[in-house]
Image (spheres, rainbow, N blue to C red):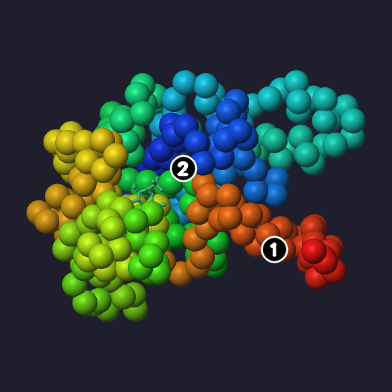
Amino acid sequence: MNARSKPVRKAVLPSAGLGTRFLPATKAIPKEMLALVDKPLIQYAVEECVASGIEDVVLVTSRGKSAMEDHFDRAPELESFLESKGKASLAEAMRRLAGLARLRSVRQQEPLGLGHAVLQARDLVGDEPFAVLLGDVVMTGPQPATRQLVEIYEATGDGAIAAAPVPREQVSLYGIIDHDPPIERDGRQLYRIRDLVEKPAPDEAPSTLSIVGRYLLPPEIFGYLERTKPGRGGEIQLTDALRQLARERTLWAYVCQGKAYDAGDKLGFLEATVELALADGELGSSFRAWLRDLKI
Ligand code: G1P
């Protein structure tokens, strides 16, 4: 581990958004509770934290979204009901889910942007490096994306964000990274970030490398967030705080191994559903057979 790096023990999951891209499905339930196969999006994010060695998880929520906290809480009536019906292994799975991570939550009282949401977690994170996972981005692959960023932080002592190339006509959907040529570090290609732009027009984008929704940040980001003025869409953007951090310190971009699905988008949600269903031990082969025969 680099002399400057403290262990990464905490993650922040901004989960306060209104989910307007999925209305009417998200009118009465949080978008984070939409399920891919049989698990809600938020559970994939918490499982990624745990698989990355992080067990302290801070949910940034808002009014009407307490289903997320209920999901990770014990449910004694449900557990006894399942046991009385001979479904002991399902009851045990419900108990394991409640013990998956140490969850705490804080509310974002107004929808002032992703940067503002992360800032709400400041007291719960304290003076430590932490991960940020956007739950509508579901990542698959042999090693969790957050774990890959933790390893970069441990090796360099610097913050790192996950990146992916996108077609130029899609840059206005993402934060876009202006970067130096890649350097090799412990077998990984890292791009030092010069600047970042939130959702630029295609002809103004400094590159086609996008921010993917996984970040490993030093605690100093909170000071930058506090000073960040509303930017794109009138919101306090995490990207704008990161651009200041990248100018004054070192911030790396890394194209993580694995695939990223934007499950906050209908097409991305369907694509993630298909991949996860095909990979599912119980469903996979019958779903594959059904897909093969599907005639439309
Ligand atoms: C957010 C970030 C953006 C990033 C994207 C990744 O945007 O602001 O920089 O590229 O997540 O999914 P959102 O999709 O929440 O509008």
| Residue 240 placement (x, y as % from top left) | 21, 47
> Disc 2, disc 1: CB below 8 Å?
no
Q: Is residue 180 visible?
A: yes
Image check: 96 left or right of 60? right
User: Tag 1: residue type?
Assistant: Ala
145 shown above or below 105: below
**Which residue is disc 1 drawn over?**
279
134 shown above or below 2: above
Report helix, strand or loop for mark 2.
Answer: loop
User: Tag 2: residue type?
Assistant: Glu
- How far is mark 2 from mark 1, CA to CA? 26 Å
Quadrant (top left/top right/bottom left/bottom right) for the C terminus? bottom right
**Which residue is disc 2 drawn over?**
55
Image check: 102 left or right of 132? right
Which of the pair 38/47 is nearer the observer?
Answer: 38
| Residue 163 placement (x, y as % from top left) | 36, 63
Quadrant (top left/top right/bottom left/bottom right) for the N terminus? bottom left
The image quarter in which residue 175 lies: bottom left
What residue sits 44% from the left and 25% below the top?
A: 62
The image quarter in which residue 289 lies: bottom right
The crowd level at tag 1 (other Cα within 10 Å; few <14, some 14-19, many 20+) is: some
What residue sits 31% from the left and 53% below the top?
A: 199
What residue sits 55% from the left and 61% below the top?
A: 140
Q: Residue furthest left?
A: 248
Report helix, strand or loop for mark 1.
Answer: helix
Q: Which mark is residue 172?
A: none
